[in-house]
Image (cartoon, rainbow, N blue to C red):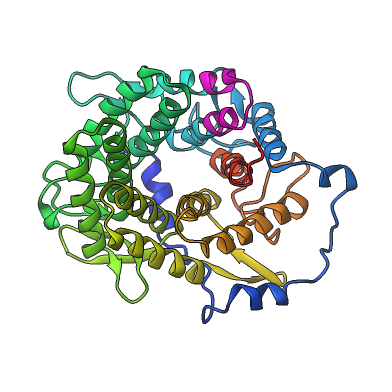
Protein backbone atom coordinates (compact mmCIF):
# COMPACT_ATOMS: atom_id res chain seq x y z
CA UNK A 1 0.00 0.00 0.00
CA UNK A 2 1.06 3.59 -0.50
CA UNK A 3 1.53 5.26 2.87
CA UNK A 4 0.29 8.71 3.76
CA UNK A 5 3.83 9.95 3.16
CA UNK A 6 2.79 10.44 -0.49
CA UNK A 7 -0.05 12.73 0.48
CA UNK A 8 2.22 14.78 2.70
CA UNK A 9 5.11 14.97 0.25
CA UNK A 10 2.98 15.81 -2.75
CA UNK A 11 1.28 18.58 -0.81
CA UNK A 12 4.73 20.05 -0.18
CA UNK A 13 5.32 20.36 -3.89
CA UNK A 14 2.64 23.06 -4.06
CA UNK A 15 4.34 25.24 -1.48
CA UNK A 16 6.40 28.16 -2.79
CA UNK A 17 9.77 28.67 -1.11
CA UNK A 18 10.53 32.08 0.35
CA UNK A 19 12.59 33.82 -2.30
CA UNK A 20 15.10 36.57 -1.78
CA UNK A 21 15.88 39.47 -3.95
CA UNK A 22 19.12 40.24 -5.74
CA UNK A 23 21.61 38.34 -3.56
CA UNK A 24 22.57 41.24 -1.26
CA UNK A 25 25.77 40.77 0.69
CA UNK A 26 25.50 39.22 4.10
CA UNK A 27 27.09 42.26 5.67
CA UNK A 28 24.51 44.63 4.15
CA UNK A 29 21.60 42.42 5.20
CA UNK A 30 22.88 42.04 8.74
CA UNK A 31 23.35 45.79 8.98
CA UNK A 32 19.64 46.14 8.28
CA UNK A 33 18.82 43.70 11.07
CA UNK A 34 20.46 45.26 14.09
CA UNK A 35 17.15 46.15 15.71
CA UNK A 36 16.38 45.09 19.26
CA UNK A 37 14.32 41.93 19.69
CA UNK A 38 10.77 42.58 20.82
CA UNK A 39 10.95 39.69 23.33
CA UNK A 40 14.35 39.71 25.07
CA UNK A 41 15.61 36.42 26.48
CA UNK A 42 15.27 35.79 30.20
CA UNK A 43 18.73 36.01 31.78
CA UNK A 44 18.76 32.39 32.92
CA UNK A 45 18.29 31.15 29.32
CA UNK A 46 21.05 33.28 27.87
CA UNK A 47 23.64 31.08 29.55
CA UNK A 48 22.58 27.90 27.78
CA UNK A 49 25.12 26.65 25.27
CA UNK A 50 24.08 25.17 21.95
CA UNK A 51 25.02 21.76 23.32
CA UNK A 52 22.65 22.29 26.25
CA UNK A 53 19.90 23.53 23.95
CA UNK A 54 20.21 20.35 21.86
CA UNK A 55 19.72 18.22 24.96
CA UNK A 56 16.84 20.40 26.18
CA UNK A 57 14.96 19.87 22.91
CA UNK A 58 15.61 16.13 23.16
CA UNK A 59 14.20 16.10 26.69
CA UNK A 60 11.12 18.03 25.56
CA UNK A 61 10.48 15.42 22.86
CA UNK A 62 10.78 12.61 25.40
CA UNK A 63 8.16 14.36 27.50
CA UNK A 64 5.64 15.09 24.75
CA UNK A 65 6.17 12.58 21.95
CA UNK A 66 7.43 9.35 23.54
CA UNK A 67 5.09 6.38 23.05
CA UNK A 68 6.39 3.11 24.47
CA UNK A 69 9.75 2.53 22.73
CA UNK A 70 8.85 4.74 19.76
CA UNK A 71 7.27 8.17 19.20
CA UNK A 72 4.04 9.82 18.21
CA UNK A 73 3.90 11.42 14.77
CA UNK A 74 2.49 14.66 16.22
CA UNK A 75 1.85 16.41 19.51
CA UNK A 76 -0.90 17.23 19.96
CA UNK A 77 -2.29 14.40 17.85
CA UNK A 78 -3.70 15.31 14.45
CA UNK A 79 -6.54 13.76 12.48
CA UNK A 80 -5.45 10.56 10.76
CA UNK A 81 -2.29 10.06 12.79
CA UNK A 82 -0.77 6.57 12.68
CA UNK A 83 -0.26 4.58 15.86
CA UNK A 84 3.44 5.48 15.82
CA UNK A 85 5.48 7.96 13.84
CA UNK A 86 6.53 7.15 10.31
CA UNK A 87 10.15 6.28 9.65
CA UNK A 88 11.03 9.71 8.26
CA UNK A 89 10.52 11.64 11.51
CA UNK A 90 11.92 8.73 13.51
CA UNK A 91 15.22 9.16 11.67
CA UNK A 92 15.38 12.64 13.17
CA UNK A 93 15.71 10.89 16.53
CA UNK A 94 18.53 8.69 15.21
CA UNK A 95 20.35 11.89 14.29
CA UNK A 96 19.66 13.10 17.82
CA UNK A 97 21.19 9.96 19.31
CA UNK A 98 24.31 10.33 17.20
CA UNK A 99 24.86 14.04 17.72
CA UNK A 100 24.21 13.94 21.47
CA UNK A 101 26.65 11.06 21.88
CA UNK A 102 29.24 12.91 19.80
CA UNK A 103 28.73 15.91 22.12
CA UNK A 104 29.57 13.76 25.14
CA UNK A 105 26.17 12.70 26.43
CA UNK A 106 25.66 9.10 27.54
CA UNK A 107 25.72 6.42 24.85
CA UNK A 108 22.45 5.03 26.22
CA UNK A 109 20.63 7.72 24.19
CA UNK A 110 22.18 6.50 20.94
CA UNK A 111 21.53 2.85 21.86
CA UNK A 112 17.89 3.55 22.71
CA UNK A 113 17.15 5.32 19.43
CA UNK A 114 18.82 2.67 17.26
CA UNK A 115 17.09 -0.10 19.20
CA UNK A 116 13.73 1.52 18.40
CA UNK A 117 14.68 1.73 14.72
CA UNK A 118 14.51 -2.04 14.44
CA UNK A 119 10.72 -1.85 14.76
CA UNK A 120 10.76 -0.57 11.16
CA UNK A 121 13.05 -3.27 9.72
CA UNK A 122 11.47 -5.49 7.09
CA UNK A 123 13.71 -8.57 7.10
CA UNK A 124 12.37 -9.90 3.82
CA UNK A 125 14.21 -12.42 1.67
CA UNK A 126 15.10 -10.00 -1.13
CA UNK A 127 16.57 -6.56 -0.48
CA UNK A 128 15.67 -6.20 3.21
CA UNK A 129 15.43 -2.61 4.41
CA UNK A 130 13.40 -0.31 6.63
CA UNK A 131 9.79 0.38 5.75
CA UNK A 132 7.71 3.51 6.23
CA UNK A 133 5.94 2.36 9.43
CA UNK A 134 6.66 -0.23 12.13
CA UNK A 135 6.23 -3.77 10.84
CA UNK A 136 3.71 -4.46 13.60
CA UNK A 137 1.38 -2.03 11.81
CA UNK A 138 1.40 -4.07 8.59
CA UNK A 139 3.25 -3.87 5.29
CA UNK A 140 4.02 -0.40 4.00
CA UNK A 141 6.19 1.05 1.25
CA UNK A 142 9.97 1.06 1.09
CA UNK A 143 11.28 4.51 0.18
CA UNK A 144 14.73 5.02 -1.27
CA UNK A 145 15.11 8.39 0.44
CA UNK A 146 13.99 7.00 3.81
CA UNK A 147 16.48 4.17 3.51
CA UNK A 148 19.22 6.62 2.58
CA UNK A 149 18.70 8.84 5.61
CA UNK A 150 18.70 5.71 7.79
CA UNK A 151 21.94 4.59 6.11
CA UNK A 152 23.51 7.98 6.80
CA UNK A 153 22.80 7.59 10.51
CA UNK A 154 23.95 3.94 10.57
CA UNK A 155 27.24 5.06 8.99
CA UNK A 156 27.60 7.84 11.55
CA UNK A 157 26.85 5.45 14.42
CA UNK A 158 29.57 3.12 13.11
CA UNK A 159 32.05 5.99 12.89
CA UNK A 160 31.23 7.04 16.47
CA UNK A 161 31.11 3.63 18.15
CA UNK A 162 33.10 1.24 15.94
CA UNK A 163 30.26 -1.29 16.30
CA UNK A 164 30.34 -3.49 13.18
CA UNK A 165 26.58 -4.05 13.35
CA UNK A 166 25.98 -0.51 12.10
CA UNK A 167 28.32 -0.86 9.13
CA UNK A 168 26.91 -4.27 8.18
CA UNK A 169 23.35 -2.98 8.38
CA UNK A 170 24.36 0.08 6.33
CA UNK A 171 25.70 -2.28 3.65
CA UNK A 172 22.38 -4.13 3.57
CA UNK A 173 20.37 -0.93 3.28
CA UNK A 174 22.73 0.48 0.66
CA UNK A 175 22.12 -2.57 -1.52
CA UNK A 176 18.41 -1.72 -1.45
CA UNK A 177 19.13 1.93 -2.23
CA UNK A 178 21.26 1.02 -5.24
CA UNK A 179 18.42 -1.14 -6.59
CA UNK A 180 16.38 2.04 -7.09
CA UNK A 181 18.43 3.05 -10.12
CA UNK A 182 17.73 1.94 -13.67
CA UNK A 183 18.32 3.27 -17.18
CA UNK A 184 14.95 4.97 -17.71
CA UNK A 185 15.42 8.72 -18.24
CA UNK A 186 19.11 7.96 -18.53
CA UNK A 187 19.55 6.94 -14.88
CA UNK A 188 18.70 8.33 -11.47
CA UNK A 189 16.60 6.83 -8.70
CA UNK A 190 12.87 6.40 -8.23
CA UNK A 191 11.24 7.72 -5.08
CA UNK A 192 9.91 4.45 -3.69
CA UNK A 193 9.97 0.79 -4.57
CA UNK A 194 6.37 0.32 -5.68
CA UNK A 195 6.94 2.76 -8.56
CA UNK A 196 10.29 1.30 -9.60
CA UNK A 197 8.87 -1.65 -11.55
CA UNK A 198 7.36 -0.78 -14.91
CA UNK A 199 5.47 2.36 -13.87
CA UNK A 200 3.90 4.02 -16.89
CA UNK A 201 2.26 7.19 -15.58
CA UNK A 202 1.16 9.31 -12.66
CA UNK A 203 2.87 11.89 -10.49
CA UNK A 204 5.02 9.30 -8.69
CA UNK A 205 6.36 7.63 -11.83
CA UNK A 206 9.47 9.79 -11.79
CA UNK A 207 13.16 10.04 -11.00
CA UNK A 208 13.88 12.34 -8.07
CA UNK A 209 16.67 14.71 -7.11
CA UNK A 210 16.45 13.81 -3.43
CA UNK A 211 16.79 10.04 -3.82
CA UNK A 212 19.61 10.42 -6.34
CA UNK A 213 21.54 12.92 -4.21
CA UNK A 214 21.09 10.86 -1.05
CA UNK A 215 22.19 7.72 -2.90
CA UNK A 216 25.34 9.45 -4.15
CA UNK A 217 26.15 10.69 -0.66
CA UNK A 218 25.60 7.30 1.00
CA UNK A 219 27.57 5.31 -1.56
CA UNK A 220 30.45 7.81 -1.55
CA UNK A 221 30.61 7.46 2.25
CA UNK A 222 30.50 3.69 1.92
CA UNK A 223 33.44 3.86 -0.47
CA UNK A 224 35.38 5.98 2.02
CA UNK A 225 34.75 3.35 4.70
CA UNK A 226 35.22 0.16 2.66
CA UNK A 227 37.26 1.09 -0.42
CA UNK A 228 34.89 -1.10 -2.48
CA UNK A 229 34.89 0.24 -6.02
CA UNK A 230 31.20 -0.52 -6.69
CA UNK A 231 30.25 2.27 -4.29
CA UNK A 232 32.48 4.87 -5.89
CA UNK A 233 31.33 3.99 -9.41
CA UNK A 234 27.68 4.23 -8.36
CA UNK A 235 28.18 7.50 -6.44
CA UNK A 236 29.90 9.19 -9.36
CA UNK A 237 27.34 7.97 -11.91
CA UNK A 238 24.28 9.04 -9.93
CA UNK A 239 25.85 12.38 -9.00
CA UNK A 240 26.52 13.10 -12.68
CA UNK A 241 22.95 12.12 -13.62
CA UNK A 242 21.51 14.51 -11.06
CA UNK A 243 23.92 17.28 -12.05
CA UNK A 244 23.18 16.93 -15.77
CA UNK A 245 19.44 16.22 -15.56
CA UNK A 246 17.96 18.12 -12.62
CA UNK A 247 20.37 21.02 -12.05
CA UNK A 248 19.10 24.42 -13.12
CA UNK A 249 22.13 25.86 -14.97
CA UNK A 250 20.94 29.40 -14.25
CA UNK A 251 21.61 29.07 -10.52
CA UNK A 252 23.16 25.63 -9.85
CA UNK A 253 20.22 24.56 -7.68
CA UNK A 254 18.21 21.40 -8.25
CA UNK A 255 14.73 20.82 -9.59
CA UNK A 256 12.67 18.25 -7.72
CA UNK A 257 12.07 15.47 -10.25
CA UNK A 258 11.47 14.44 -13.84
CA UNK A 259 8.34 12.49 -14.81
CA UNK A 260 9.05 9.34 -16.80
CA UNK A 261 5.80 9.33 -18.74
CA UNK A 262 5.71 13.00 -19.72
CA UNK A 263 9.42 13.92 -19.43
CA UNK A 264 8.22 17.07 -17.64
CA UNK A 265 10.48 18.50 -14.93
CA UNK A 266 8.96 19.60 -11.64
CA UNK A 267 10.89 22.83 -11.14
CA UNK A 268 10.28 23.15 -7.39
CA UNK A 269 13.55 23.67 -5.51
CA UNK A 270 14.16 22.59 -1.94
CA UNK A 271 16.97 23.34 0.49
CA UNK A 272 17.69 19.67 1.15
CA UNK A 273 18.22 18.79 -2.52
CA UNK A 274 20.90 21.47 -2.69
CA UNK A 275 22.31 20.26 0.62
CA UNK A 276 22.79 16.66 -0.42
CA UNK A 277 24.42 17.56 -3.70
CA UNK A 278 26.84 19.77 -1.77
CA UNK A 279 27.61 16.93 0.62
CA UNK A 280 27.97 14.33 -2.12
CA UNK A 281 30.19 16.70 -4.07
CA UNK A 282 32.48 17.23 -1.09
CA UNK A 283 32.74 13.47 -0.55
CA UNK A 284 33.61 12.89 -4.20
CA UNK A 285 36.20 15.67 -4.08
CA UNK A 286 37.81 14.01 -1.06
CA UNK A 287 37.81 10.66 -2.88
CA UNK A 288 39.05 11.84 -6.26
CA UNK A 289 40.86 15.13 -5.60
CA UNK A 290 38.93 16.42 -8.63
CA UNK A 291 38.51 20.18 -8.08
CA UNK A 292 35.36 20.26 -10.22
CA UNK A 293 33.36 18.48 -7.52
CA UNK A 294 34.36 21.10 -4.97
CA UNK A 295 33.71 23.95 -7.40
CA UNK A 296 30.21 22.59 -8.05
CA UNK A 297 29.50 22.25 -4.33
CA UNK A 298 30.60 25.84 -3.70
CA UNK A 299 28.49 27.14 -6.60
CA UNK A 300 25.41 25.39 -5.22
CA UNK A 301 26.12 26.73 -1.72
CA UNK A 302 26.36 30.31 -3.01
CA UNK A 303 23.03 30.04 -4.80
CA UNK A 304 21.35 28.22 -1.93
CA UNK A 305 22.18 31.12 0.37
CA UNK A 306 20.87 33.60 -2.19
CA UNK A 307 17.71 31.68 -3.10
CA UNK A 308 16.63 30.48 0.32
CA UNK A 309 17.11 33.60 2.47
CA UNK A 310 15.09 36.78 2.83
CA UNK A 311 14.69 39.65 5.30
CA UNK A 312 12.10 38.93 7.98
CA UNK A 313 11.66 40.93 11.18
CA UNK A 314 14.56 43.12 10.11
CA UNK A 315 17.10 40.31 9.82
CA UNK A 316 18.07 37.45 7.52
CA UNK A 317 16.18 34.17 7.79
CA UNK A 318 16.37 30.99 5.81
CA UNK A 319 13.01 29.96 4.37
CA UNK A 320 10.34 30.05 7.04
CA UNK A 321 8.95 26.55 6.44
CA UNK A 322 10.24 22.98 6.39
CA UNK A 323 12.72 23.23 9.27
CA UNK A 324 14.27 19.80 8.71
CA UNK A 325 14.98 20.54 5.04
CA UNK A 326 16.75 23.72 6.13
CA UNK A 327 18.84 21.93 8.75
CA UNK A 328 20.10 19.56 6.07
CA UNK A 329 21.49 22.67 4.38
CA UNK A 330 23.13 23.77 7.62
CA UNK A 331 24.84 20.37 7.90
CA UNK A 332 26.02 20.69 4.29
CA UNK A 333 27.45 24.14 4.97
CA UNK A 334 29.34 22.80 7.99
CA UNK A 335 30.86 20.02 5.89
CA UNK A 336 31.79 22.46 3.12
CA UNK A 337 33.26 25.02 5.52
CA UNK A 338 36.43 22.94 5.83
CA UNK A 339 37.21 23.91 2.23
CA UNK A 340 35.38 27.23 1.78
CA UNK A 341 35.72 29.91 4.45
CA UNK A 342 32.87 32.02 3.06
CA UNK A 343 30.50 29.25 4.09
CA UNK A 344 31.20 30.22 7.72
CA UNK A 345 29.14 33.37 7.05
CA UNK A 346 26.18 31.27 5.91
CA UNK A 347 26.46 29.17 9.07
CA UNK A 348 26.55 32.32 11.19
CA UNK A 349 23.17 33.34 9.75
CA UNK A 350 21.80 29.90 10.66
CA UNK A 351 23.07 30.31 14.21
CA UNK A 352 21.34 33.68 14.52
CA UNK A 353 18.11 32.08 13.23
CA UNK A 354 18.33 29.26 15.76
CA UNK A 355 19.04 31.57 18.65
CA UNK A 356 16.22 33.88 17.60
CA UNK A 357 13.87 30.89 17.42
CA UNK A 358 14.83 29.82 20.95
CA UNK A 359 13.76 33.21 22.26
CA UNK A 360 10.86 34.08 19.96
CA UNK A 361 9.42 31.01 18.23
CA UNK A 362 8.40 28.52 20.93
CA UNK A 363 5.04 27.80 22.49
CA UNK A 364 4.10 27.12 26.11
CA UNK A 365 5.13 23.47 25.72
CA UNK A 366 8.57 24.64 24.45
CA UNK A 367 7.86 23.30 20.96
CA UNK A 368 9.44 25.29 18.16
CA UNK A 369 7.34 26.92 15.48
CA UNK A 370 7.94 25.68 11.97
CA UNK A 371 8.72 29.31 11.16
CA UNK A 372 11.82 30.24 13.16
CA UNK A 373 11.11 33.94 12.67
CA UNK A 374 8.17 33.47 15.04
CA UNK A 375 5.54 34.85 12.66
CA UNK A 376 3.63 31.58 12.22
CA UNK A 377 3.39 28.39 14.26
CA UNK A 378 3.00 26.32 11.09
CA UNK A 379 3.19 22.54 11.59
CA UNK A 380 4.90 22.87 14.97
CA UNK A 381 3.23 19.67 16.15
CA UNK A 382 5.18 17.37 13.79
CA UNK A 383 7.94 15.32 15.43
CA UNK A 384 10.37 15.99 12.58
CA UNK A 385 10.16 19.76 12.99
CA UNK A 386 11.17 19.39 16.64
CA UNK A 387 13.89 16.78 16.01
CA UNK A 388 15.42 19.15 13.46
CA UNK A 389 16.36 21.52 16.29
CA UNK A 390 18.35 18.81 18.08
CA UNK A 391 20.40 18.36 14.93
CA UNK A 392 20.71 22.11 14.39
CA UNK A 393 21.93 22.95 17.89
CA UNK A 394 24.07 19.81 18.01
CA UNK A 395 25.77 20.40 14.66
CA UNK A 396 26.51 23.99 15.61
CA UNK A 397 27.85 22.91 19.02
CA UNK A 398 30.27 20.57 17.25
CA UNK A 399 31.16 23.26 14.73
CA UNK A 400 31.93 25.60 17.63
CA UNK A 401 33.90 22.86 19.45
CA UNK A 402 31.58 22.85 22.44
CA UNK A 403 31.85 19.08 23.03
Rendered residue at 23%/46% (across/down)? 235
Along the line of sight, the residue nearer the viewer: 221 or 259: 221
Residue 188 visible somewhere in the drawing: no
Position in image of residue 42 (x %, y %)? 88, 48
Q: Residue furthest bottom?
A: 22
* Quarter of the view holding residue 220: top left
Residue 109 falls within the magenta-colored stretch: yes
In the rendered view, does 364 fall on the left or right side of 70? right
Q: What residue do we see at 52% from left, 30% from top?
A: 98
Q: Is 7 positioned to the left or the right of 384 in the image?
A: left
Q: Quadrant of residue 100?
A: top right
Q: Nearer the viewer, residue 354 or 63?
A: 354
Query: Residue 191 location, x and y as percent?
Result: 28, 46
Asked whether the viewer can see residue 13, the reply is yes
Q: Position of residue 202 (x, y in %)?
A: 22, 54
x, y percent for residue 303: 44, 70
Range covered by the magenta-colored residues: 96-112
Quarter of the picture containing the C terminus is top right
Q: Is residue 8 above or below residue 151?
A: below
Q: Please check the rendered image and state whether residue 26 is part of the magenta-colored stretch, yes or no.
A: no
Figure quadrant of the N terminus: top left
Along the horizontal axis of the image, is 305 left or right of 278? right
Determine whether 133 is above or below 313 in the image: above
Task: Find residue 123 and report its image quarter.
Answer: top left
Residue at image coords 77%, 71%: 34
Q: Nearer the viewer, residue 79 or 87?
A: 87
Amino acid sequence: MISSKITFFCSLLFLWGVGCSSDPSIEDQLEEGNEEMENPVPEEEESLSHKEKAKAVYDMIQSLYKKEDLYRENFPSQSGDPAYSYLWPYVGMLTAGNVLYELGYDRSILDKEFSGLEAYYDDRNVLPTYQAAPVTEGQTDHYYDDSAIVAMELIKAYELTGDAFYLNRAKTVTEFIMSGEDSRMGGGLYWFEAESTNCTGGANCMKAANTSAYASYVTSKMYQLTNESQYRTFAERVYEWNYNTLRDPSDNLYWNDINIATEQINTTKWTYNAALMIMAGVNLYEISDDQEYLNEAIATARSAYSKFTSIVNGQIFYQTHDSWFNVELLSAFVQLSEYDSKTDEYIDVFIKNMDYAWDNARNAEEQFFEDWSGNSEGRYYWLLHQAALIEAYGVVALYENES
